[in-house]
Image (cartoon, rainbow, N blue to C red):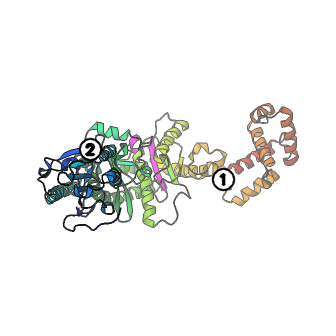
Amino acid sequence: MGNVAKDSALVDRELPAHGALGVPGPGLSLGTVLELECLRGARVLAGHAGLDRLVSRLNVMEVPDILPWVKPQELLLTTGYPLRGVPHSLPVLVSELAARGLAGIAVKLGRYLSELPAAMLEEADRLGLPVIALPDDVGFDDIINQVLTEVLNRQAAMLARAEDAHRALVQIVLTGGGLDRLCEELAGILGGAVMVTTADGRVRASAGATDEDLAGALALDCFDPTGRFLVEGEPVGARTPGGDRARRAVVRIVAGALDHGRLVAFNASHELTPDDVHTLERAATVAALAITKAQAVSAVESKYQADFLRDALAGRAGTAERVTAHADSLGWDIGRRMVVVVAETDPHATPRGLSRDEVRSLQDRFATAWHQVVRVRDERAPVVGFSQEVVSVLGVPDDADTESISRTVREMVRVVSGDGGGGRRSFSTGISRPIDSADQLPQAYEQACKAVSVGRQMHGPSALTHFDGLGIFRLLSLVPDTAELRSFVAEALGELVTNDTPENADLRTTLSVLLDTNLNVAETARILHFHYNTLRYRIVKLERMLGPFTSDPNLRLTLSLALQVVQMRGI
């Protein structure tokens, strides 16, 4: 089809562009347009399935070659004049117009064309593109004026609604309300459920129009088993209509260059529209104000709390009675049986090139995650974030043993870690022995730090270690000179470590199992799946290399220590 000039007075009368008035997606459904006074006598000839298409523009078709100027969401007005000479090509025209996102075709029949070809109407039905017969007594200018007026009125109402919502949300913050109150107000405006999450998806506040709305949202597949919202799989902004994902919307909460999290809306009964997304974006600005305000207050409180706990962990806070009493004034209980838990980010877990503010934001997020998880189990447990670590002082039952305490902390670590998505950093965790008094906090803190350090050497990043599980490694870690440890290992194990071949690695394994079973040859052969004679041959070979360890207990101790040093990483 060729190009054609357009009538400047009537053709392509376009509504305000997307977002031009501060609101997204202006338009009316075609079904709503047909209810206007000027179109009372209009008849839908075909394409009834497309009456929910949006009309945001109007265009007048003067010749068949209109395609270069057709735009999405247009209602195309025409008479029979440009259609009369090409009835055989009208099905193709309908197909091409539908592909361009046309809202519908409105035709005034009679003078030039009494009826439309059946093939054209069949194609319109197949594609769901409405074809409408206009009343004889209506003018195109009347249709254009009334549709534009209706859409502009809708825009004005939408702007007023957005302003009212924004004013109400700002008032919440100004009167001391927090994120929970903000979510409640938004749930009332949008229906369904609304949540504020951290940048990695940890839910900070939530509310629903009903309890069922909130429970239904939390049961969706966009949450992992730990309750973290999977931000990395959820696009921000308006979504393509259709499907369950269109029933939720996500916007960022940003203040300056800092990403404070996400504002998420869910609605089980209908899809969220661009208008709803715009309301969320306005609300996200208010949420950023609330978060910034809370952070300013929290920064002062956290510094005071962190300074006090740091002094208590260093033994500088005074007597046990004074420390316990002051902690009670902060809402903490450290006058009971407890353990110190240290969670420290792994050395290479923080991306390089981040600014100081971005690193601080990551650490604040890490501390917030621990704070939320610990509060669920123990509301009066101190949880404080330092530069690279988060320290928690957890209450434990009097009969709790090492295994049960480790199991409890492991569950907390699992929830804090989530599935590792959302920009989460790996961290290692250490647990102290139980203590019964605040004056034992320095010793317990040192034990937890040692468990983190040695546990990472033993097991690598993301290790979780109880101090009682360190064993001989605790003593080995006290040796400050790693060169001396390497020398000791080389002298004790010789070419088993200096010549790291597969055969020597296999012999090291054999030696380790032999020592672990107290030289029980039969048990060692069973564990390693060796024939008894094969193992006897290996023992002879090991004694030629290392000495008579089967008969010399001191040599066995030396070899055991050397193998333990080999197991430690970073040596």
**How far across and how far down the image is residue 146, in percent?**
14, 56
Q: Quadrant of the N terminus?
A: bottom left
Q: Secondary structure at mark 1?
A: loop
Residue under the image location 26 percent in, 38 percent down: 210
Q: Tell me if label 2 and label 1 are in contact, CB under 8 Å.
A: no
- In the rendered image, the vertical position of residue 397 relative to residue 485, given as above or below: above
Whether residue 213 is in magenta: the answer is no
Q: CA distance from mark 2 to mark 1?
A: 75 Å
Magenta part of the protein: which range? Answer: 374-401
**How far across and how far down the image is residue 181, in percent?**
25, 49
Give the side of residue 531 with respect to residue 179, left or right: right
- In the rendered image, the vertical position of residue 523 relative to residue 477, given as above or below: above
Residue under the image location 45 percent in, 53 percent down: 366
- Report the amino acid beneath label 1: Arg
- In the rendered image, the vertical position of residue 7 relative to residue 100, given as above or below: below
- Report the amino acid beneath label 2: Ala
> In the rendering, which numbered label is found on residue 81?
none
Residue 69 visible? The answer is yes
Residue 328 visible? The answer is no
Q: Quadrant of the C terminus?
A: bottom right
* Of the pair 53 and 199, the residue shown nearer to us: 53
**Residue marked by disc 2:** 46
**How far across and how far down the image is residue 140, in percent?**
16, 58
**Residue marked by disc 1:** 569
Marks 2 and 1, the one that precedes in the sequence: 2
